[in-house]
Amino acid sequence: MSESVDPLVKITRVPERGAYDKESIYSTFDDGYLCHVAYESDHGPVVLPTLYGRHENFIYFHGSPAAGMFRRANSDVNISLVVTHVDGFVLARSLFHHSMNYRSVVVIGKAEKVEDPKEVMHGLEVITENCLPGRWDEARQPNDVELRQTTVFRLELTAASVKARTGAPGDDAEDIDLDIWAGVFPVVSGVGNPIPSPDFTAGTDLPSSLRTFRQIPEDA
């Protein structure tokens, strides 16, 4: 990220909630795995969800070469990539002051198609490992046919910012004594027990990546 704040990602509403440092931006990306990518198609604006991974100052994501977003990449048109975490519902005494505790990172820039075969594999590994650490080495890796059906892009985190809200509701002074519950209702994401495929080989143990991810119980 550059020293100055790019006007495209500068926080103008409640600017004190904004951050532009690498630690805040990286950690917000690293806590997620699903992003939304916005771009201008031939028929108007489009927003698509996709998995991603971060390595150093780049976000990698992938999709079908036939997708409109990928056909238009490497052009002079910017895309916008967003990741949002909902951490809690903020319940005030008045409906007007209800809010949400959240962390959201936005990056705007030109997506670059990865052409080097080694970096293509690297990008796919970054995405896989971001979703489920350890899975890349457990499964069969992409072959040449599959790689021809996959496009990998990287987006440099040059223009990026984080906006976040934390803490309790901000009720008006005249509402403090109302007999209405107020506080934060935390929102926590998690995973359930693995569900084997119908054609799963019964003698195969649950892989290490699943055992260690969010500490799935041994008897799962």
Image (tube, grey):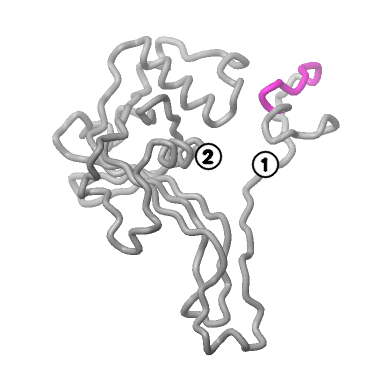
Q: Residue 152: image x %, image y %?
A: 35, 24
Q: CA distance from mark 1 to mark 2?
A: 14 Å
Disc ID at residue 46: none
Which span is picked out in magenta? Answer: 202-210
- What type of secondary structure mainly makes up the magenta span? loop
Residue kind at label 2, given as amino acid type: Asp
Question: Is 220 on the left or on the right of 174, as rendered?
Answer: right
Does the magenta segment cover residue 204? Answer: yes
Residue at point 19% right, 29% down? Answer: 74
Q: Nearer the viewer, residue 160 or 18?
A: 18
Q: How many marks?
A: 2
- Residue 36, located in which quarter of the rendered image? top left
Question: Where residue 178 sits: x, y (%)?
Answer: 62, 88
Q: Is 106 located above or below residue 127 in the figure?
A: below
> Could you tell me which secondary element the residue under label 1 belongs to?
loop
Residue at screen point 25% across, 37% down: 3
Which residue occupies the extreme left position in the image? 76
* Quadrant (top left/top right/bottom left/bottom right) for the N terminus: top left
Which label was assigned to residue 31? 2
**Vertical placement of 122 versus 62: above or below?**
above
Q: Quickly name the residue at label 1.
A: 191
Task: For residue 63, say whether it is visible.
Answer: no
Question: Of label 1 and label 2, which has the lower sequence position?
Answer: 2
Quarter of the image for the C terminus: give it. Answer: top right
Residue 71 point in image, percent of width and height: 23, 31
